[in-house]
Image (cartoon, rainbow, N blue to C red):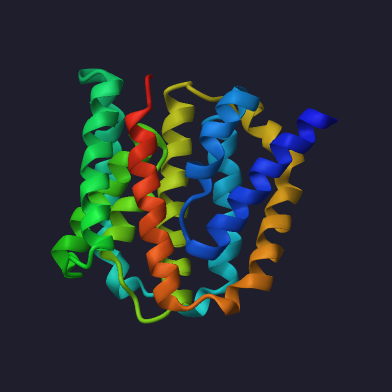
Amino acid sequence: MTHWLLVSSVFAFAALVQSLTGVGYALVAAPLLMMLAPELVPGPLLLLESLLVLWLVIRERHAVDLRILRGALLASLPGAAIGVLIPLTFPAPVIAAVLGVGIIVLSVMALGGTMIPMTRWTMASAGFGAGAMNSIAGIGGPPLALVYRPRDAAELRTNLSLCVLIMSIFSIAALLLRQVTTVGSLAESARYVPTLFVGFFLARAMIHRISAAALARAVLWMSLLAGVSLLFRTK
């Protein structure tokens, strides 16, 4: 029972972060789950993330802007496919280190006020990078978070969540095809579904107190944390 409560607390906190910022579920949960319940990574974790972001997108569907995201979403698919192949060619620690350093540099630049222009090409490039990173490391949000700057907080949360949803579904399919995870292991996530609602409703109580500027800055800090976490990946 104590173990279940610990794991549930991890999932609930991850859901809170994701619901507030639009990114961060896997980033928060994966390192802790690797210590507490490694059997829940990556398949069940990605499934729970998909269920949460689907709910977030449905709740704030009025904020979805496919005109801006279309290029990024389309580019994320070949990025994800290439991301599946890259670990077969290069050692995982090398890949993680290169990605981590790149994200850290871009995050520090953005936090310092140097912003990447949000154009059709930069969004497509970010989508490609996000798809590749999601397949390689299960962390797809940071590349998009560094480029995407919408008009308000709802658009930021919802559209980042939509991107995470599509990439997570693709990653789950790839994991099943490669037999890295099974339908049986995915079913293990069912008992943790209530934690999604705990995190979501906690976020709803806080969400109107956070400005778009503060939220955007929080997302950049999450991206920086993602880059640092990649430097400590050993496999």
Instruction: Give residue 11's quadrant in the image.
Output: top right
Foreground residue, 2 or 72? 2
Q: Going 59% across and 31% down the picture, which residue do you hit?
A: 33
Q: Total marks drawn?
A: 0
Q: Going 46% across and 36% down the picture, which residue do you hit?
A: 173
Image height of 183 relative to 234, above or below: below
Give how far across and how far down residue 82 sits, in percent.
Answer: 24, 35
Give how far across and how far down residue 67 sits, in percent.
Answer: 29, 74
Q: Is residue 232 left or right of residue 180?
A: left
- Name the image quarter holding the C terminus: top left
Is residue 188 among the parts visible in the rendering? Answer: yes
Give how far across and how far down residue 42 sits, in percent.
Answer: 51, 31
Farthest residue, direction right: 1
Image height of 201 relative to 138, above or below: below
Give how far across and how far down residue 220 sits, in percent.
Answer: 35, 59
Q: Going 72% across and 47% down the picture, which residue do you hit?
A: 193
Q: Is residue 140 left or right of residue 123?
A: right
Image height of 83 relative to 206, above or below: above
Is residue 73 among the parts visible in the rendering? Answer: no
- Name the image quarter holding the N terminus: top right
Q: Going 53% across and 66% down the picture, which residue do you hit?
A: 57
Q: Is residue 187 left or right of residue 64?
A: right
Q: Is residue 163 left or right of residue 112?
A: right
